[in-house]
Amino acid sequence: MRKNNFTTTKPANRKLTTEKSADKAAAPAAKAAAPVKSAAASGSTSSAPAASVSSEKSEPEKTWENAAAYKVSKETFRAELDELLELGFHTDFESAPVETLYKAIATLINKQLKRRRFEFQKARRKAGKNVPDTKKIYYISMEFLMGQSLKNNLYNLDETDLVAEVLKDRKLTPQDLYDCEPDAGLGNGGLGRLAACYMDALASQGYDAVGFSIRYEYGLFKQKIVDGWQAELPDNWLPGGYVWLNRRDEDTFKVSFYGDYEEYWTDDGLKYNLNNAEVVDAVPYDMLISGANSRVVDTLRLWKSESSNDNDFDMASFNNGDFSRAAQKENRAHLISKVLYPADNVEEGKELRLKQQYFMVSASCQNIVRNHFRDYGTLDNFSDKVAIHINDTHPALTIPELMRIFMDEYGYEWDDAWEQVSKTVSYTNHTVLAEALEKWNEDIVRVMMPRIYSILKEIDRRFREDMEEVFPGDEGKIDWMTPIAQGQVRMANLSVLGSQSVNGVSALHSEILKDDLFHDFYLATPEKFTNVTNGIAYRRWLCQSNPKLAGLIDSCIGPDYRKNADLLEKFADFADDPSVGEQVLSIKRENKVRMSNLIKKTTGIAPDPDSIFIVQAKRLHEYKRQLLNALRIISRYQKLKENPDLDMRPETYLFAAKTAPNYYLAKSIIQLICKIGEEIEKDPKIRSKMRVMFLENYSVTMAEHLMPAADISEQISLAGKEASGTGNMKMMINGAVTIGTMDGANVEMHEAVGGDNIFIFGQNAEEVQDNLRSYDSRRLYETDPVIKAAVDALGTGFAGTDFNNLKQYLIQKTYSIADPYMCLADFNDYCRVHKEIQDAYEDRKRWAHMSIINTAKASRFAADRSIREYADNIWHTKPAE
């Protein structure tokens, strides 16, 4: 296979671009890299309403080398807080509302982070070429589900006790401050939370990293359940979250859309004009990311879209009373960063989603290249010093945008630009679901970003030529692999062919990518494909969220596992220690009481903490099979109605999930769960034995309470559909026992804990593929009386609402296949394994053993391990620290 050099089609005897000279692109590059105050050197400008406060004169100099100087005494912290409250918030410590105390203390913590970031970057510049094996890591993702920042930063800075001491004078606790902070509305589910965990791990292990995303004014949405139906309200997180954002106007970049595009040839190669473009400003807001046990502070840079110039406000229209027209251009600019994931069931929504992606990518790439050229004076070493990782397909336009910048702004020829770009970018695939493998209408791309479209066409042409050498004459295969075909731009294909590495997020998922989804790519370039199983920020999900369990582990094996997750596995040595087992069960009950009290505050219902807490918390989607869970609950409810005196441990089923606003089938499943719970609540005898609750507005903060309270973790997706999962890891590390299919990371969890400490049911991925075409849910429905009774109950309904649509979904071929995720096929085995779990739970010694083993063996699912694998095997870099 020849090297993919991709050049634009050109007339005979014409040059593509100017010849590369020794001082390549000096003029345009110098212009692009005009002196700008360094992001690293400036320390950033806080957006908080605070006066400059400093007590550093009496303290040791705070430098990278003098880490001890960052330790703050209670007296110093209190003095800075008093001054800030007086000058910045016009109040004092004794009378300030709790919300003001939160903002003031957050401002001081943010100030510490800025100082540490400044010193870290100064040390990096000082070291210069003396650290040859380190790269700058850039992680681009549409989502970063950060949750609350104050608690995490206090833990990482080891200042939780300090703040607790200060707050004692007001008879307050740190939790009172945490409750004032909204979750940062920058993500949806596992994709965004994974990105947040990785930023934590990058900083904790000393890597020099920047995350890039969008500063959404409104997050995904605030979920409200009305008569069981999901309604969406604006998630206005900024009033409480703004204190962590540091606006950096000096790093603003311009992003162009639309315009009149014209290409022409000159003696110097291909040139183009783009006139009448719609230009917006990408204004950066930096959220600083602390690391635990680390001096490194990394950055999450969030782009806000703003009008590019004052002329965008039409003063003439305003003076004529046409106020809407006057602000039309301004509003179009602001709309880009207004809300995460606009609905894509209408063309306008699709167009806005694509515009968001290019806005994020263009600003980020301009920033990356400008900084590199400023530091090195050349882009020839770009791939040696930079690693750019695209998190799923949303940032796929990184590839053509980097090509545009290299060629148009720095004068590189295509071959040289492509070599640098394709050796720098790497791609993580997060799903095999067709709807998530983004495809954009070719005409929309051509109109919205004409220069990028021209580059995409050339990438497509050259790739076809290369693949013709690999698969000669197989036009169908080649057409399947190309980035542009059948009127669509296919982002997954673009991501694969333009990246130096492609990885899945669990061992099973990565094999599916090679064997199925990207099989042809794998045949052509097998060396590209690898696996990095997902991981979680275990210090947040264990040490912070479950402090009593973490304290018990400290007493058993010492605290060093907080720095090195591998050491957590030593806790398995205590699996049969009766005293430790009793303490594990006691801590679990305390966490269940805490969760029960939290639920009572919002619903008025307090679940019994002595019942089994059976938890399914994740995005609601057909393939995750919340419907299978609901069907078994219906069957269980039917048995209780037949025998209300059934001898059983009470069960509490807790669901938490959001789904897309236009995903009506998923909304019906939410309503079904709510209505089942509503009907059960009407029968005092049955509700004493089982309760079903749907927890409204699932968030990171809710999860931090819910995961430690879970006895059973439901991970029941159809095998082969879940890429990995991370909720399974969070419940596992908190001692929950998993019931699941051999799907995603469940496979590796089973390997880690052994078959005696996890409950596996259902078909495996290979069996699913073998059985899917011949699967007949109707036959199962008609021949199995238990299944039939549960499905028929959907038609009868619950709490006055019928669910005939879900019944038809399961047994009628209204789709390409009835019951496409094979709920009925796995139903009986699912019921069987639930019975095994209930029996195991009654053996308290056995259950404590299983819980301890799960916590200990979760060590392999730490984000620290994932990041080391990315760094060693994909990015080829070492920690800067």
Image (spheres, rainbow, N blue to C red):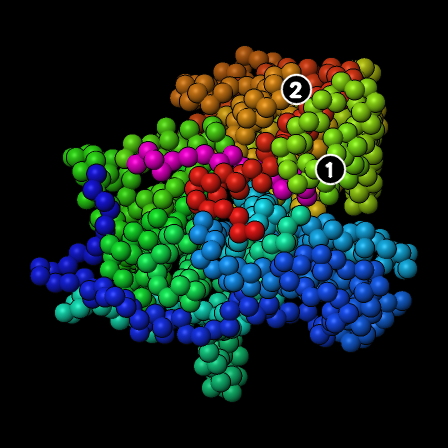
- Residues in magenta, as a range: 525-541
Please tell me in which quadrant of the rendered image residue 578 appears: top right
Q: Is residue 787 above or below residue 504?
A: above
Left or right, 290 with respect to 256, comes to right
- Please provide percent x and percent y for residue 577: 79, 20
On screen, residue 628 versus residue 545, left or right, reads left
Q: Position of residue 525 (x, y in %)?
A: 30, 36
The residue singled out by tag 1 in the image is 559
Mark 2 sits on what residue?
Answer: 757
Q: At 21% across and 38% down in the image, what residue appears?
A: 1
Secondary structure category for the residue under label 2: helix
Count neighbours of disc 1 (C-alpha within 10 A) and say few if under 14, some if 14 to 19, many if 20 or more.
Answer: some
**Above or below 192: residue 528:** above
| Residue 830 visible in the picture | no
- The amino acid at mark 2 is Asn
Q: Is residue 20 visible?
A: yes
